[in-house]
Amino acid sequence: MQEESSENRNYGDLKKWQELVLKGDLIYPHEAVARFAAKFKPASAMDFGCGTGRHLACLAKAGAKELIGVDINALPLAAVALKFGAIKDAKEWENGKKLNLENGATLELFCSDGKSLSEILSDKKVDAIISWGVLHLYEPSAAAEILKEFANSLNENGRVFINLRTDADGLKIGAERINQNSYKTTRKGYEGLVYSFYSKTEIEEIFKLAGLKIIALDKEEFTQNNGEIFNSFYIVEALKEAK
């Protein structure tokens, strides 16, 4: 897939996303990702939309020796390299440079702005691809194209593990509809960001289009601020079947 220019992407203001990621600087992995990493134990793994690296750290602890982080913004990637102790100053980070870690693993960090995954990785393939809180920033057709790129970047019997906001998610309330499944949010702190909200059927369709077999489709729902905020996610694990 040839990605759209950054001005035309679905998810809105990139600078705002960068500010949110750096401000939040999430430390702990999501429990579902930690379980996936501990169960599957990939030797090589990529986090697409890695932010400041919480899930890369989780994959490393599960034994992955080849780690790849991809994000639309560069500043969080420098933060990842710092956290792993691969550099001593953020200015030392170089896009795509292979970094050697103390445990013998390698870490490669790529800024994806304006580039497709195939352009970034070339013929490199991995055992697992994580993408957490990312693909619902794309409309279903664009998400299907990204999943196709995931499939092309996986070894046989490799796994994809992602989450997507459901069509019942609270961010949809009061959001401005842009087109068929694209909404500009109005929630405080998320103003102007663009999301898509997925039904189970839409998820099944986009994974089928990508040639990935869903092996687990679960739902996670929880509230925040004493019930004021309702979050609803589908969690999907899919397989690239051997030919």
Image (spheres, rainbow, N blue to C red):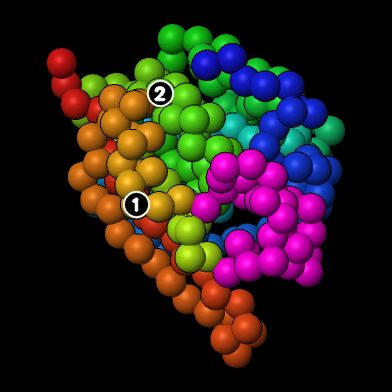
Quadrant holding the C terminus: top left
- Mark 1: few/some/many CA within 10 Å (<14, 14-19, 20+): few
Q: Is residue 208 above or below residue 18?
A: above
Q: Identify residue for label 1.
A: 200
Q: Amino acid at mark 1?
A: Lys
The quarter of the displayed image where residue 204 is located: top left
Residue closest to the eye, 6 or 98? 6
Binning the other alpha carbons within 10 Å of mark 2 as few (below 14), some (14 to 19) or many (20 upward) gives: some
* Residue shown at the point (25%, 41%) measured from the top left: 214
Provide residue 63's location: percent of width, then percent of height.
Answer: 35, 43
x and y percent of residue 186 in the render?
76, 63
Q: Earlier in the sequence, mark 1 or mark 2?
A: 2
Residue at 69%, 45% (x, y): give it.
178
Query: How far separated are the C-alphas under marks 1 and 2?
Result: 18 Å
Q: Specify whether residue 122 is painted magenta.
A: no
In the image, the segment drawn in magenta is 170-197
Give the camera-side residue of 143 and 151: 143
**Can you see residue 82?**
no
Is the Cβ of the residue at disc 1 closer than 8 Å to that at disc 2? no
Q: Is residue 73 left or right of residue 66?
A: right
**Left or right relative to 153: residue 12:** right
Residue wearing tag 2: 148
Q: Is residue 113 left or right of residue 89?
A: left
Which residue is drawn at the image coordinates 23% and 35% (left, top)? 213
Element type where label 2 sits in the image = helix
The spot of residue 202 in percent (x, y) is 38, 43
| Residue 94 screen position, x and y as percent | 73, 24
Which residue is at 40% across, 52% downward?
Answer: 199
Is residue 118 something one can see in this rendering? yes
Q: Which residue sits furthest bottom?
A: 226
Magenta stretch: residue 184 in it?
yes
